[in-house]
Amino acid sequence: MLPFKTLIIVEENSPVAIYRQIANKLIGLIQQGLLQPGVFFPGSRELAAILGVHRKTIIAAYQELAIQNWVETLPRKGIRVAADLPVIKPRSFKRAGQSLPYHEPARFSFLNDVTGIDANPELRRSDIVVNDGFPDTDLAPFDLLMREYRKQLQGVYLKRLMSMRDFGGTPALKDATSLFLNDSRGLNISNEHILITRGAQMAIYIAASLILKPGDKVLVSDPNYFIADAVFTKMGARLVRIPVGAEGMDVDAIENALKKTKIKLLYIIPHHHHPTTVTMSSSRRIKLLQLIKQYQLPVIEDDYDYDFHYRNSPVLPLASASHGGNVIYIGSFTKLLAPSFRLGYMIGPANFIAQAINLKRLIDLRGDTLMEEALANMITTGDLGRHIKKSNKIYSQRCDLICQLFNEHLNHAVTFSKPQGGMALWLKFHKEYPLATIIPKALSAGLVLLGSAYYKGENEKHNGLRFGFASLKEKDMQQVVDILSLITK
Amino acid sequence: MLPFKTLIIVEENSPVAIYRQIANKLIGLIQQGLLQPGVFFPGSRELAAILGVHRKTIIAAYQELAIQNWVETLPRKGIRVAADLPVIKPRSFKRAGQSLPYHEPARFSFLNDVTGIDANPELRRSDIVVNDGFPDTDLAPFDLLMREYRKQLQGVYLKRLMSMRDFGGTPALKDATSLFLNDSRGLNISNEHILITRGAQMAIYIAASLILKPGDKVLVSDPNYFIADAVFTKMGARLVRIPVGAEGMDVDAIENALKKTKIKLLYIIPHHHHPTTVTMSSSRRIKLLQLIKQYQLPVIEDDYDYDFHYRNSPVLPLASASHGGNVIYIGSFTKLLAPSFRLGYMIGPANFIAQAINLKRLIDLRGDTLMEEALANMITTGDLGRHIKKSNKIYSQRCDLICQLFNEHLNHAVTFSKPQGGMALWLKFHKEYPLATIIPKALSAGLVLLGSAYYKGENEKHNGLRFGFASLKEKDMQQVVDILSLITK
């Protein structure tokens, strides 16, 4: 007989019933070949004594095994391992009961060049965190959103809302989004041109998946939003870098690239470019639109930051000009709410959007329909618009203040241009202050710089990082500047 | 001078300020080449008269154009289109102001063979909807979940929770998930083996993306969860179908396939197979585990329905037996809550999960961290466990009732096996009642059959559909059976 007392350890404090613990361990022994087909189990009284449990517990465990067809009961003989189970060569007793298949690395081949993520630093309670440019959660309209959300939970259509097939967004949110975009960006779209996604990131991924094949060439800026770079690289595409200056991406360089070689896609952030926050000039926009039409060049226009502008109206997106249907326009509601409310959209010609919806379903079966309806209501009631206006005022003041502080105290170490809007600025450190040492120094002084930093490998020349000011209070800014001054002394 | 009165139509009722409407229209005229570089605008008084608006409005519009660098102001001469803008060949007046680039199909090449979605039928208020097997939203623990969610919104760590980089799930939800899975499935995993996703679908997509290359062969059941089929097909893989019978997938057929050709992946739902609800027998499981180890065969085990079982404990997943680290295990919390709460998980060896986390970030930058924390709390307080127990009791009764009704009234038209758990049964219609006619007939009688139906193309032989009973009340079931009886008379 097997040494059941050693093999079956019962945990009294486990939330799993003891009979189930025993049944599961016995199944393990069968699966490992230690209890072979046809072998009889000890009687319930006997096993109960061995394990120190009540006999009824063993009977329940055996019943469980019987229901699951692991054992068969022979009248007056007892219970044995089902004779029709395949015979397995038993392994050593030592490993019995220790099935830890996940504790060794996978040895089958899989894609393993997807760009990694820097570890999250350990945070202390007193640390100040500077993010990539997120909205201030203290301003987020949680109450309004939760009010709308609760309405959905109590609504008479809840069940239907939840069981409908997903067409890339609830009709109400598509209606509200086209209204919102037509008003604010002059897009002239209707529902068939919209896919609702989990934030702009999913829209970039889906658009790139539909457009790119391995070996295709993609024009991107230098530097470029690094996660977009990683998406295109994952698709097997090759990146062709275009310099970005004070007027945005260099359109002459784009034209040269188009003349020289077959380009499959242009990825561009004309408004508040990520990471540099530069906005493309009007003359470059006009020239670029001509090129797009001339070369029938597919474009992903990432406009993650359109709604945040301080002094003037934002420049209209490429998507609202005449572009021959080549511009896939991507934006986000996340920045209007808070980072964990992941809602974005993709705008494109109806045939493209139809395929995007189909692909989205393979990735993410169904959206958060309740949150979508809640947001739709916030848009149509005007609550969202009012929230944007209110926060713009505050972010604009914060932008003024941080720029003033940097100018007064950090001119020796950094350069930056005051952005026209948005929630972050592009802080370039002088060569003498490499971010490779600045970031860890700041961390030990209690300042966690979490914004995207461009200083490794081909990005070493930039030595810059996104400094998200929108969620920093006045006293935090003071402290941040004090720490940065100190470590750049 | 251009016919501004015709080209610039001001909408009084638009939420966009009138000066901005005019500015945007003027930018459109510049972009279309109708207002060439260097051309002077009418004076503000003149244009105000033409358009019938106040002069101040025109001044504001011109200022907007100036700030955006579309125009330049020449002292004492007036305002003209910036001379440094590229010259564009103007198009006919007729199309001016009608930039509708999204109203024609995209003509650039893109992937256009992603499987489509059947249209949602138009619903009347009185219609009964039978879904694919969703939990009853009337039982969903919304109050508990919202309580936990609100706690997060008010928590002191809110800002940090939202600005941290995403590592495929919040630490608290990973802790709770490993606890939950170790207890209920004996998995012996820790946080490094877990990726939290938006539902099981995203986990399938990510696992398949990492494992499959174009041309690879995948073993799937016949019939198989059709969205998984579509995922593999999208990756360029070829499906090799294995029959599924009362004991689950035919393991001998799997062995033959493995002997005959190189197989890259097995996709299997051993517990409550989708669509057929069959659970794989113990003997087949043991043999399959041997094959997995012998051939080092990567496996996606989709266990979407483990927590719902009525009479006995569920059969333990393949993942908790000894499988050499080859089984990527996928499950979902969505079924435990409600369809729009999309939270699922992928379990695998640490090196695989690390890549899966990196890929997930490209697709979906950040999870709903607040909902993740809320769910984590529901798990650790035991609220989720109690909810599962409570709903299982109700679903079990509903399962009994629907089976009894089908037996009494529909034996002439359908066959089915009573499932051991889950939320749906596999309803096969006799050949005389093809679903191609049954579904529309039911619809016109007020019964909307939304469950996955297998009757087109290669699936014609199955002529079956998923009948989700879990969210049907007693009177609904009566009505459903009445309608089905009527249309199969």
Image (cartoon, coloured by chain):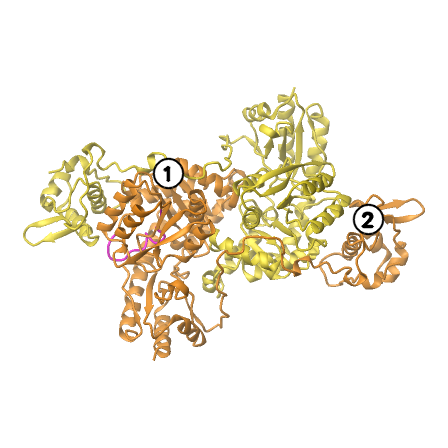
Chain colours: A orange, B yellow
Circle 1: element type: loop
Residue A182 locus on image (x, y percent)? 31, 42
Q: Which chain is home to disc 1?
A: B
| Residue B454 shown in magenta | no
Q: Is B99 placed above or below A418 here?
A: above
Quadrant in the rendering for residue A55: bottom right
Residue B170 locus on image (x, y percent)? 54, 60
User: Looking at this view, is B139 or B342 the one in front?
Assistant: B342
In this rendering, would B204 be left or right of B107?
Answer: right
Quadrant in the rendering for residue B91: top left
Whether residue A364 is visible here, answered yes or no, is no
User: Looking at this view, is A409 or B210 the one in front?
Assistant: B210
User: Badge 1 local density, few (<14 within 10 Å), some, or many (20+)?
Assistant: few
Name which residue type carries label 2. Answer: Val
In the rendered structure, which segment of residues is drawn in magenta? A300-313
CB under 8 Å between discs 2 and 1: no
Label 2 vs label 1: CA separation?
58 Å
Outermost residue toward the left? Answer: B76
Q: How many marks?
A: 2
User: Badge 2 local density, few (<14 within 10 Å), some, or many (20+)?
Assistant: some
Name which residue type carries label 1. Answer: Phe
Q: Which chain is home to disc 2?
A: A
Circle 2: element type: loop
Residue at mark 1: B108
Which disc is residue A87 wearing? 2
Whether residue A46 is visible here, answered yes or no, is yes
Rendered residue at 70%/25% (across/down):
B409
Outermost residue toward the front? Answer: A260
Outermost residue toward the right? Answer: A76
Q: Are marks 2 and 1 on the same chain?
A: no
